[in-house]
Every structure is written in structure tokens, then in C-alpha cells.
Amino acid sequence: MKRSVTPMTVLITGATGGIGGALAEVYAQAGNTLILQGRNTVRLTELAGLCEAQGARVLTQALDMRNRDEFSAWLQEICLQEKVDLLIVNAGVNTNIGPEGAGERWDDVQELIEVNVLAAMATVHAVLPSFRARGAGQIVLMSSLAAYFGLPVTPSYCASKAAMKAYGEALRGWLAPEGIQVNVIMPGYVESQMCRDMPGPKPFLWSPEKAARFIKLRLARNQSRISFPFWLSSGSWWLSVLHPAISARILRLLNYGG
């Protein structure tokens, strides 16, 4: 397994979220440049201060990824100005069927696909030419254990994360011969507002800091699929290989049945 070069310039989308912010802090050190994007300007400013206190140079951009033309133009400009080593496509939103199972609002579904899928792909599309020109770089896509088998309470979210899993695996096979590494992150439950808003039990809950340290270590090893925690990851994988009727029954017993 090829070991990654230690990244000096790290670009993180969705940096104001739980995992995104924690990843920014674990990569913040003297000599490193962090390029942080998010919609929460207050949190973005606070996070920049924390990372600068650790010696990092920090560039921030408060920009909505759904404005894809503007967002892509910013990414292309950044890639001309900075030599990005590591791109972490982390931004994401969630929606669910509601406490009474009424169903997802179509406006929420559209926003979710815009952010979790289209904006994520647009991010890669904008940054990739600079990586291919250098024959180097690392792309990280944030999927979820929910990509293994769709949870009835969050159908659109699961679909979006399954898309990221497949997209990342395909990119890895395509780009590896060019020296570009692609990794798919598949977290379980990590403490954040988005996690708290999700219905159903949240077993084996990790802190964002623990998740960020785990991810950084395995990215340095260029691990293709980074899933955690172990027991929840194993159970989610089994849901994908068992007969769907059995998996659906297990989910109902665990109170994820909708």
C-alpha cells in the first residue's frame, strides 16, 4: 500500500461542521496551509483563530456550495494560487421522514442532492485538473455507513452517501495510475448537530476529535475505505449482504424501521 506524502496544504469543504472542524484542527500546525469553506461565518472565523493559534496559515471562504458556478470558480482560482495536496469533500446535509413518518419534503430532498452529491462532484471536478497536471494529490469523499443499506428513516441521505461511496471507489480506480489517491470515509455516528437531528438510536457515538484523529491516521496510509467504529461498521456491512427482508427486519427491531 502506497504511503501518502504528508499534506502541507489542505482544503476542507463543510469545515464548520463537526467532523470538518475537527479535521481542520488536526491538520493545523506550523508550515501548513488550511483552506476552509463553510456557510457559518461565525464558526468559520472562530475555527480559523483556533487553527492559526496552532501555527497554521488559514484561508477562509464563506460560500454556499449550491451556487455551483461561483463555487467552482473560487476552487479553480484557489488551485492557481495554492498547491493543494489534500482535498476533503466533507460538506453535507441531512433530512428524514419526520417523527410521524409523513415523508421527506421535496425542497429538502433537492437541497440534499444539491449539496451531498452535485456540489461534492463539482468540487472534485474543479480541483482535479490541478492534481492531474502535477500527477499528485489526495481526494477524500465523505460517505457514511448508511451507504451500505438504506435506513427507512433517512432514504435520501442514504442514497446520497451510497452515491459518494460508488463515486469515490470509481475515482480511485481511474486515478491511481496517475499518482492521485482517492479515499472514501464511512463514519458511523459522530457527535454534531446533524447527528442529533437524525432519528433513531445512535450506538457507538464518537466525538469529532476522535473521528478526525482516526481519519488522519488512515489517510496517511492511503486506506481506500475508512469506516468506523468497528462493530457498527461490521453490522452495517452485513446488512448489505444479507437478504433484504432479513436486513429490514433487523432495522425494525433496532427502531430504524420508519
Image: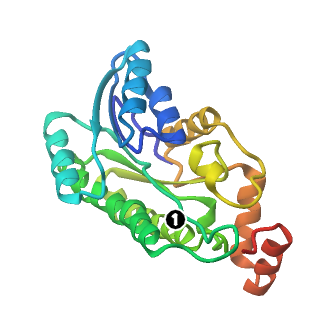
Q: Give the x, y percent position of residue 112.
A: 44, 64
Task: Write down the quadrant of residue 249 in the picture.
Answer: bottom right
Q: Is residue 127 visible?
A: yes
Which residue is at 42% across, 24% downward? 46
Image colouring = rainbow
Which residue is at 56% across, 36% downward? 212
Query: On screen, 50 above or below 101?
Result: above
**Secondary structure category for the residue under label 1:** helix
Task: Write down the quadrant of residue 56 in the picture.
Answer: top left
Q: Give the x, y percent position of residue 27.
A: 45, 28
In the picture provided, is 2 more to the left or to the right than 240?
left
Residue located beneath label 1 in the image: 161
Query: On screen, 131 above or below 159?
Result: above
Q: Give the x, y percent position of residue 42.
A: 39, 30
- Viewer-proximal residue, 177 or 12? 12
Task: Write down the quadrant of residue 145 in the picture.
Answer: bottom right
Query: On screen, 61 above or below 147?
Result: above
Which residue is at 75% across, 69% downward? 256
Which residue is at 14% across, 43% downward? 77
Give the tally of numbered discs: 1
